[in-house]
Image (tube, grey):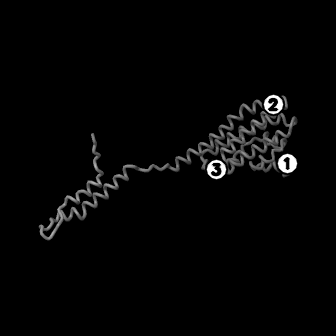
Amino acid sequence: MCIRTPPHPLVQNIALIHQIPAYSSTSSAPSNFTMFFTKYLVPALAVFGMAASVIATPVVHPISGELVSKRADNVLSTVQGVSNSLTPLTKALASATATADVVAKVDAIVDVFAKAKVDLLGLVGVDITADVDVIAKLNVDLIVKLLAALNLHAILNLSIVAKIDAALSAYLSVLATINANVTVKIGKGIPLLSLNIFVFLKLILTAKVLGLVNVLGLLGL
């Protein structure tokens, strides 16, 4: 059994042309209606038929504002992830006694900063103005806790401090690239006691990124 598919409206419209009697010298003059239909109405129907087929399949484009908002949230979630990951590591570092344990915890902390740096590099150019204060506070809190833990082991092995300084400063540098106000607020939010630890541990790279002029001055830089 053969099922016939209805012809496209454009085909039907064109077929109408062939149904109109041809005008010849022996036939009567065509009516005004026939001339109007042939000259204007049929072409108009054909155009509308093609337009309808195009409108039936609209193209959906993403809204740029939504993408920017989503990516901005990714910056905050990345920083929150750093904070969450460092909380147990800094506690373990503070309580570690053996050198091997200290080095292991420091290496784990360095890995957290390194991964976050890579993630943030993919978000450079995102507007995070609305999240600047929250991001700054998260970083101040994690830096203060990290400095306190490092201070307990500074005499044991100063090389571990150099590892942290390099990783932390690289992470903060990317944040500064995304929004310079973030690192300014972080530097201003660090309490005086922790700034003294900065000087004692000689965290030169991190002090430069945060614009801690007083610390750099005390270090003779």
Return the residue found at the far bottom. Answer: 25
Mark-to-mark CA distance, 1 and 3: 32 Å
Residue 145 visible in the shown view: no
Q: Amino acid at mark 2?
A: Asp
Circle 1 Cα neighbour tier, 10 Å, few/some/many (<14 / 14–19 / ≥20): some
Pick whichever, 175 or 34, lies toward us.
34
* Residue to which mark 2 is pinned: 101
Q: Position of residue 79 (x, y in %)?
A: 66, 40
Q: Position of residue 46 (x, y in %)?
A: 29, 58
Residue in the picture at 31% in, 56% down: 48
Does 155 appear above or below 71? above
Residue in the picture at 16% in, 65% down: 32
* Residue to which mark 3 is pinned: 124
Relative placement, left or right, of 85 versus 192 is left
* Residue to which mark 1 is pinned: 219
Does 15 appear above or below 218? below
Residue in the picture at 22% in, 59% down: 18
Pointer 2 or 3: first along the chain: 2
Q: Amino acid at mark 3?
A: Val
Mark-to-mark CA distance, 1 and 2: 30 Å
Give the secondary structure at mark 2. Answer: helix
